[in-house]
Image (cartoon, grey):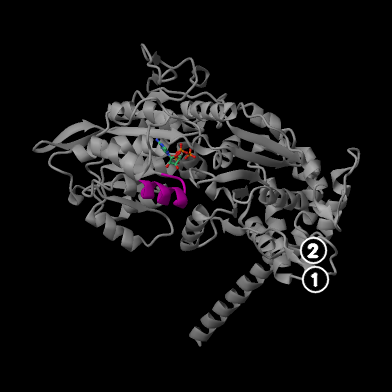
Amino acid sequence: MKIRDSKKEEIENKKKDIFASCSFSDLGLHSSLCDQLRERMGFEAPTLVQAQAIPVILSGRHVLVNAATGTGKTVAYLAPIIHHLQGYNPRIQRSHGTFALVLVPTHELCMQVYEILQKLLHRFIWIVPGYIMGGENRNKEKARLRKGISILVATPGRLLDHLRHTSSFTHSNLRWIIFDEADRILELGFGKEIEEILELLGSRKVGSDIKGNGVSECNRQNLLLSATLNEKVNHLAKISLENPVMIGFDNKQIQPHTSLEVNGSPGPDVDDEMELGSKAIISSTEDYKIPAQLVQRYVKVSCGSRLVIFLSILKHLFEREASQKIVVFFSTCDAVDFHYSLLSDFQWSPYSQQEAELKQMFLRCKTFRLHGNMKQDDRRVTFGAFKTEKLALLLCTDVAARGLDCPKVRCIIQYDSPGEATEYVHRVGRTARLGERGDAILFLQPIEVDYLQELKKHGVSLTEYPILKVLDAFPLYGQTHRVRKSVFLESHPWVLYLQNALESFLLAEPKIMKLAQKAFCSWVRAYTAHRGELKRIFMVKKLHLGHVAKSFALKQQPSLVGKSFQLQTNKRKRDQKQKGVLKKRKVANKT
Ligand SMILES: Nc1ncnc2c1ncn2[C@@H]1O[C@H](COP(=O)(O)OP(=O)(O)OP(=O)(O)O)[C@@H](O)[C@H]1O
């Protein structure tokens, strides 16, 4: 009885950390929208960030929202917009064009926001949602824009394309611009595009508002949101926001020299809400917000044993829980492709390698992959399928790091380090969403452990993962092998056995071997591409390339120089051949 009571108490406390004690209608939202949120979407109460942001956004102020991953930021900005749009009298029509524009960094996020919009707009069929993004058919998008899209979700490049070339795209009634994952949009190098977009849309200029019997003037309202709003968004904030309200910032995150105008008497739910002038500067010493219940650990393993340890952890996690989802992040598309093929096909025998008839799949779960080199449709299908699976593994690059909301992801593994602390925060944010439990495991080589200090600067601290315990638990030849602590991880019998099995497997699978060689080369290239300051941690000079090869189950290190040299030579030969053909043609024409 006591246990049940304490569990109940725990759940109640957890709810208090995530949800506000008011209702959606207390926040001023229209009753049909509140019904929609409750009945169709199952949202009983607003989350804390929704309770803070919705009234401020409803009031028409520009807003910067900095809230942890998985706390419901999407509804926080969509609900107030829908509230206003549904209230326009006469009703808005498609011919009025776009009223709200949501800018997002990736295709997946674009689709996800669009899907949430569709659900929210179920009772307001005259408000039309739509999306445009790179990789889609431009002409079809043009046709949709010509018909009119009331709330448009877009990636920056494609939006700019339509702003320049689609004359039938009506945006003269635009009232809201939202930058979801604002810092990522800038990190992806869209800074210039964003400036041009704001210019073409008339940044901070007066928008229009259809009310009563015609068009009257009202202010443009811009919103910037992320779990990692940092100093990088200062410029964007300056050019797009006017006297914004800041939600979810600590005092130390706002530079003291700015003309701070702290709210007079903050209410119980807005204790860290502030206003600041147009010179707003967010300082670079920000602590990022991580879900409190997330268990964050690192596993320190030398390069040569990385693959074996990775596979062992996966096996351990999938065998521990019958139903769970795991997401693994890699630095390159090639690495995703290689590990995807390996994990989809790798069979082993716990007894002896020779006993082929006893071989079984190493992992018994559905494996998916997601990266930027895949076709748009494949990306869509993968993401949709992974969402609905109960027992599944997703191998991906950072295209899946931001904003993606997959239910029941239990663990995030960062097999390749993210580099930027912001990306660490977003990657781990794919689990432990909305108060759910979650684990995060970061792989580090002994030469990279200073990275933990880098994370600490942003208030992120990790403890060590008990890897030896996991390895000891695997039966080998029918027995468990407990190893004394003094023995190196690398010489653990299980590690030696599995490495050998993987290398033999690859020798018998030339296709996968090719993928491994390609992945090896791009992995080394990606390692050299860490940002300046991080180069002192991720030092390519300190890498033992033979050990890197082992981490791709390769017995021998593929030649990096040879490969690029060969590619260059081939290209030169092709070019020369083409020139030769052209010359010959010219000569032929002359004669
Ligand atoms: N009031 C609510 N009650 C219950 N569930 C909610 C509520 N608001 C949002 N959710 C759900 O919470 C999950 C996380 O929401 P959302 O994706 O908007 O978070 P986020 O803060 O934008 O995360 P990220 O920073 O990772 O993008 C979603 O599954 C969403 O449907």
Identify which amino acid the numbered label 1 is placed on.
Answer: Ala
Ligand 1 shown in quarter: top left
Mark 1 to mark 2: distance in Å? 7 Å
Q: Position of residue 589 (x, y in %)?
A: 49, 84
Residue 371 percent location from the top left of the image: 56, 55
Is the shortest distance between ligand 1 and the CB of mark 1 under 8 Å?
A: no
**In the rendered image of this protein, does residue 206 appear above or below residue 517?**
above
Please tell me the numbered disc located at residue 549: none
Q: Quadrant of the N terminus?
A: top right
Residue farthest to the bottom, as pictured: 591
Tell whether 325 sits left or right of 306.
Answer: left
Q: Main secondary structure of the magenta part?
A: helix
> Crowding near pointer 2: few (<14 within 10 Å), some, many (20+)?
some
Mark 1 falls on what kind of element?
A: helix
Given residues 293 and 542, the one toward you in this image is: 293
Inspect this view and state whether residue 238 appears: no
438 up-or-down from 65: above or below? below
Picture coordinates of residue 252, whole percent (x, y) = 52, 18
Residue at x-position 63% and y-position 39%: 439
Q: Which residues are magenta?
A: 104-116
- Residue 552 within the magenta-colored segment of the rendering: no
Near-viewer residue (279 or 227): 227
Q: If you read the primary sequence from the N terminus, does the residue marked by circle 1 or circle 2 appear first?
A: 2
1 and 2 marks in contact (CB < 8 Å): yes
Q: Is residue 572 visible?
A: yes
Say which residue label 1 marks. Answer: 356
**Amino acid at pointer 2:** Ser
**Location of mark 2 (residue):** 349
Residue drawn at the location 35% of the way across and 36% of the way down: 77
Judge the density around disc 1: few (<14), some (14-19), many (≥20) Cα neighbours within 10 Å.
few
Please identify the quarter of the rendering in which residue 451 is found: top right
